[in-house]
Amino acid sequence: MTDHRELVEALRRAGASGVDDSALARAMYSSDASLYRVPPRVVVTPREAGELPAVLGVCREAGVPLTMRGGGTSIAGNAVGPGVVVDVSRHLNRVLEIDPEAGTALVEPGIVQARLHEAAAAHGLRFGPDPSTRTRATLGGMIGNNACGSRALGYGRTSDNVLGLDVVTGSGERLGLGDVPGGGGPESAVLERLRGLVDANLALIRTEFGRFGRQVSGYSLEHLLPEKGFDVARALVGSEGTLALTLAARLRMVREPGRRLLAVLGFGSMAEAADAVPAILPHGPVACEGLDSRITGVVRERRGADAVPPLPRGSGWLLVELAGPEAGPLRDAARKVAADSGCTDSMLVEDVTLADALWRIREDGSGLVARTPEGEQAHAGWEDAAVPPERLGVYLREFEALLAEYRLFGVPYGHFGDGCIHVRIDFPLGREGGRRVFRDFLGEAAALAARHGGTMSGEHGDGRARSELLPHMYSAEALALCAEVKDVFDPGDVLNPGIIVRPAPVDGGLRAEQAVPLKRGLALAYRDDRGDLSRAVHRCTGVGKCRADNTAAGGVMCPSYLATREEKDSTRGRARVLQEVVSGKLGPDGWKSAALHDVLDLCLSCKGCASDCPTGIDMASYKAEALHRRYRRRIRPRAHYALGWLPRWTRLLARVPALIRLANAGMRAAPLRPAVAWSAGIDRRRTLPAFAPVTFRRWFASRRGEGGGEGRNGEVVLFVDTFTDAFSPDVGKAAVRVLEHAGYRVGVTERPVCCGITWISTGQLAGARAQARRTVRALLPHVRRGAKVVGLEPSCTGVLRSDAEELLSGADAAAAREVAAATRTLAELLAETPGWTPPDLSGVTGIAQPHCHHHAVMGWTKDAALLRDAGAEVGGLGGCCGLAGNFGVEKGHHDVSVAVAEHRLLPAVRRTGDGEVVLADGFSCRTQLRELADRDGEHLAQLLARHLPDAGPR
């Protein structure tokens, strides 16, 4: 069967749901988190586990490969395939049963580990292994790879925690293995043949398989030994979807310990840290993780110095976690760990928040080191080799010498207690001779690991990245036995072919080799990516953090995915399609393709990914570029003219106050509402905000000779954005009062200026450039006199701090950098104001909705500190309000906009009591609050101003 349509129809006739062979689906699922690009023919998202045998039946009959996929976070390329890719994460994600007394859970394969933890938390239970991707990795994927994670020392690998599997083999036989319902008894032909193979190869299995804890490469045949009880369920764990499809799994759950304590040990180098591991293991740590100073340096650079807590002296650290019922014995144990380790310095961390901050750095490691200090892409080609822990120090020194020999750069980190090292390496893929360097290095690295008794993979599986390297660690006889096992389970070689057995070449289908530079005709500078949009969109390595719900910890990314749970609405899904566009895989003008329109349509341009994605993706900028290219010299959607040109319309209205009254009356008139909505391209359910009768600039001009402040702390230029000027002048008035109270002389630019944010968000980048140029030139004389620029609208402040320089070139870009360096949020300026004390906010309680651009570009830490120091108890929310400038107003976006607001903001507002504040500096956030919650949000300036003493400095 070669025709796509025939395959699609056969799958639908068999009862499969979510069958999709569109260019969009094939682009999104062509990659996982690995180096490889393998476009599938069809993607299936089944709604019931019972559909999986039917899908397999079609693939067997047609001879089409079938690849199972969970969260798509595979680093080895074991979740991509050339035939049918089945995504179980969309619908097969239920917890079927939790048995608190037995301490077990029955789950479908698409359940994300973090969501299983949420369901089990009420019983004090969790699943032991915890990979860094647990917020988006599925249990099916963890079973496929035999995932381990940081706490495998305490809880074992996934295979140690699987009690039973409900599977269908590649031959089509349904097996209930272990503690799950189903067959698999003596009458099973598969199990009978498998037992015969094992009985004939006992010595081989005992000598080559299961030699140490992290030996994940190949098949885990040691579980089939008679002394291990012929445990087929555990043997299937780690088989990477090449033997059977998992329909359900029975898992062993563990109870959360009463206490956790983190000992942070400092060493002169990572190799010295590795040397200390054997002395630490006898103390029974739950985790022993390595962290390199180069990773913490990246975090400081990207997220600010506050993102890295103070650490003991050293260039490499071990994070050693101890767990138990009481704190006292743990402290004693931690001191002994530090003493026995020979570390140069140490600290004990009992504060949960501090410990979580350190773990976040470690868990974001793979994304944070995806670029070298020189800006080169670092790849996952040799990602997680493991050696026995007592060999780790020697191995690591030899490995770093091998890197130096090949003139490659990599930052090692990982599960040192298990002897497992993660590293991203700047292989010169895409350059002449790069493939040869890649192949040669992998061969030598594999031989090095094998010489130390190690394994090609310690937890991520072999996949396309390492299967070809298995002869370095297994004999020909052992590999032949693996092939026989594969043929017993999957005689047609339908399930994930090319993985483990009869491997695909390690250098076949490398995504980086297919990337085509794109530097010409761009509207933005992409300075961090050497002016290359292709390098920018290829920042996405597929780690999938955008598919996780990070909002509880204050994150924003990715609001539309959290609303729809569709891959196309994730940052990763969008990046994958953009990679296809820039590489020419979606035709000569992929910028106008339906696939690109579909993935970008629900992007809120929130910029959350710019700060929350560890690889630094900035989808808001890429979307603006895509819209710019799509509509260049073409008629645009009506909303682009109505909302994108909003600053222009407001300036025209401001010249004639009578027009303001007329416009407000027109927008309020019910008979005119449909016509207004249609002409502006907005949703009829949206109420447009009313223009203020007197603009802020008109008010400010009227007070000449009044106030102005004594200026003991110098001059500030209030950046009067369109929203403050035309819709919320009270925010500007409050800011003037606060700034004058703080001892500043407040001024504004002589003429109205605009940052260009509405032009940017609608992709009108030529217009945005003109706006940014005028604004920078108007602010520059003030800045060069020593004035600070204070922004009140976060999105506009964000443009001054980042986007303006990206829009401009030459002297204008240099001027934009000067303006950016002088631009502050209100909280930032007040934090650095000498002698100023905030008003007493004791008794003020409530919540704050930090604007997405505030979170992403400036950070909200100064605001949080100001509120805390003033005595307020106001907690910041994660997530987006859902309006996001023009997004939530445009026709077709209303329902998603409301769903985004319902994720965090609206439930939190409903929980606030009478008299509690809802802080929202963003005009769009306040508009959403008013419309959906009938609640008035308050700007920080307004909160401070109304608590100032009546008689204070003016």
Image (cartoon, helix red, strand yellow):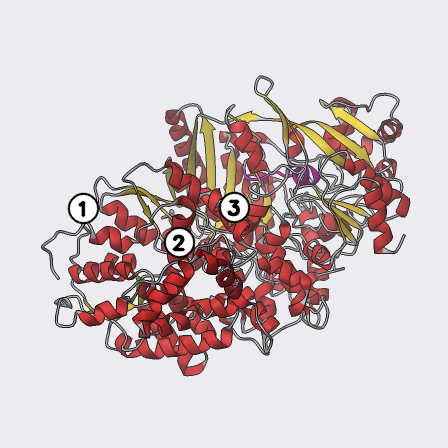
As drawn, which residue projects farthest toward the top? 101
Discs 1/3, front: 3
Discs 3/2, front: 2
Mark 2: secondary structure: helix
Q: Amino acid at mark 1?
A: Asp
Q: Nearer the viewer, residue 840 or 223?
A: 840
Q: Amino acid at mark 2?
A: Thr
796 in the magenta segment:
no
Give the residue pinned by disc 2.
927
As drawn, which residue projects farthest toward the bottom? 811
- The x and y percentages for residue 761 are 49, 65
Give the residue pinned by disc 3.
899
Give the magenta-colored segment's residue range: 139-150
Tell me whether the residue at label 1 lies in contact with that at label 3, contact meaning CB atoms closer than 8 angstroms. no
The residue that appears at 61% across and 63% down in the rendered structure is 538
- The x and y percentages for residue 757 are 43, 67
Discs 2/1, front: 2
Q: Amino acid at mark 3?
A: Ala
Q: Earlier in the sequence, mark 1 or mark 3?
A: 1
The residue that appears at 61% across and 68% down in the rendered structure is 534
Q: How many C-alpha atoms fall within 10 Å of the one at disc 1: few (<14), some, or many (≥20)?
A: some
Q: Is residue 167 above or below residue 542?
A: above
Q: Is residue 267 above or below residue 805?
A: above
Q: Earlier in the sequence, mark 2 or mark 1?
A: 1
Give the residue pinned by disc 1.
840
Q: CA distance from mark 3 to mark 2?
A: 16 Å
- The x and y percentages for residue 748 are 26, 72
Residue 119 lies left or right of residue 356; in this view the side is right
Tell me whether the residue at label 2 lies in contact with that at label 1, contact meaning CB atoms closer than 8 angstroms. no
